[in-house]
Image: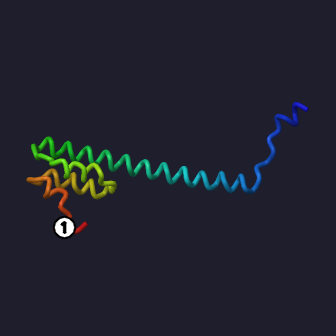
Amino acid sequence: MEQVLCTKPSPSPEEEEFVVAMQGNWEDARRLGRVEGEAKGEARALLAVLRARGISVPDAARERILGQKDPERLERWVERAAVAASVDEVIDESSRAT
């Protein structure tokens, strides 16, 4: 009797399908978490560069920076912040190719 209780039956095809689907969801969630973490770090770096250079950041610009989810765009903004005279020069995409 003890052997029967300790033996786990094989998963059904539905259970196997569920496990595979959840693994994909988990991997997607991890990837999304990495991208969001990278964007958050780039946004903080951008604000630090602007602060170190003495460039004031109005609340609307700060919200835009912190709300930006594209790490590559934020990286471009950090590069611009190193030479820009204002926050508008950093985050204004209208006159630049993206």
Which element type, helix, strand or loop, lies under badge 1?
A: loop
Above or below residue 96? Residue 85 is: above
Residue with the mark numbered 1: 94
- Seen from the viewer's position, the closer of residues 45 and 64 is 64
Q: Is 86 positioned to the left or the right of 34 in the image? A: left
Question: In the image as oriented, which residue stretches furthest toward the top?
Answer: 2
Residue 60 position within the rendered picture, expressed as x and y whole percent measured from the top left: 20, 51
Q: Total number of numbered labels?
A: 1
Residue 90 position within the rendered picture, expressed as x and y whole percent measured from the top left: 17, 56
Above or below residue 1? Residue 20 is: below
Mark 1 crowd level (few <14, some 14–19, many ≥20, 10 Å Cα): few
Q: Is 76 positioned to the left or the right of 71 in the image? A: left
Q: Is 58 positioned to the left or the right of 29 in the image? A: left
Tell me the residue at 22%/68% (across/down). Answer: 97
- Seen from the viewer's position, the closer of residues 1 and 97 is 1
Q: Coloring scheme of the render? A: rainbow
Tell me the residue at 16%/52% (across/down). Answer: 81
Instruction: Say which quadrant the C terminus sits in.
Output: bottom left
Tell me the residue at 30%/54% (across/down). Answer: 68
Above or below residue 85? Residue 3 is: above
Tell me the residue at 11%/46% (across/down). Answer: 56
Based on the displayed image, in which of its 4 quarters is residue 93 positioned? bottom left
Residue 69 position within the rendered picture, expressed as x and y whole percent measured from the top left: 33, 54
Amino acid type at mark 1? Ser
Question: In the image as oriented, which residue stretches furthest toward the front?
Answer: 60
